[in-house]
Image: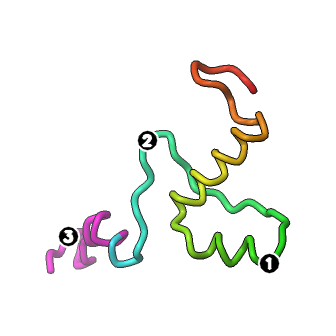
Amino acid sequence: MRWYNGGVPKPPPLELRLRVLGVEALEEGERSEKVRIRGPEELFRVLEDLSPRERGLALIKGLEVLGRWPKEGGGDA
């Protein structure tokens, strides 16, 4: 183990820490949030089986169907 700063161990690389936690690093322009939603119990069983990336894609598809997702090229829906 490498030591620096008066004997404090250097933390492992970010990639290793994320892998140990079983998560992926956010990509450019992404953010992770907790958002409250309401729905039937089955919805939450399905959502829990999806990865965070899959949940985001499913939400975008649903917003597109509802006409609430911004159109390509910018601007609001």
Magenta stretch contains residue 61: no
Horizontal and vertical percent position of residue 37: 80, 63
* Circle 2 residue: 28
Q: Which one is in front in this view, the residue at disc 2 or the one at disc 1?
A: 1
Which amino acid is tagged 3?
A: Tyr
Sequence-wise, the earlier of marks 2 and 1 is 2
Q: Is residue 37 above or below residue 22?
A: above
* Residue shown at 62% from the left, 54% from the top: 58
| The magenta segment | 1-18
Which amino acid is tagged 2?
A: Glu
* Circle 1 residue: 41
Could you tell whether 49 is left or right of 34 in the image?
left
Considering depth in this image, is 9 or 62 the residue closer to the camera? Answer: 62
* Residue shown at 42% from the left, 47% from the top: 27
The reply to whether callout 2 and callout 1 are in contact (CB within 8 Å) is no
Magenta stretch contains residue 8: yes
**Quarter of the rendering containing residue 18:** bottom left
Considering depth in this image, is 74 or 31 the residue closer to the camera? Answer: 74
* Residue shown at 77% from the left, 36% from the top: 68
Label 3, residues with CA under 10 Å away: few <14, some 14-19, many ≥20: few
Q: Which one is in front in this view, the residue at disc 3 or the one at disc 2?
A: 2
Q: Secondary structure at mark 1?
A: helix
* Circle 3 residue: 4
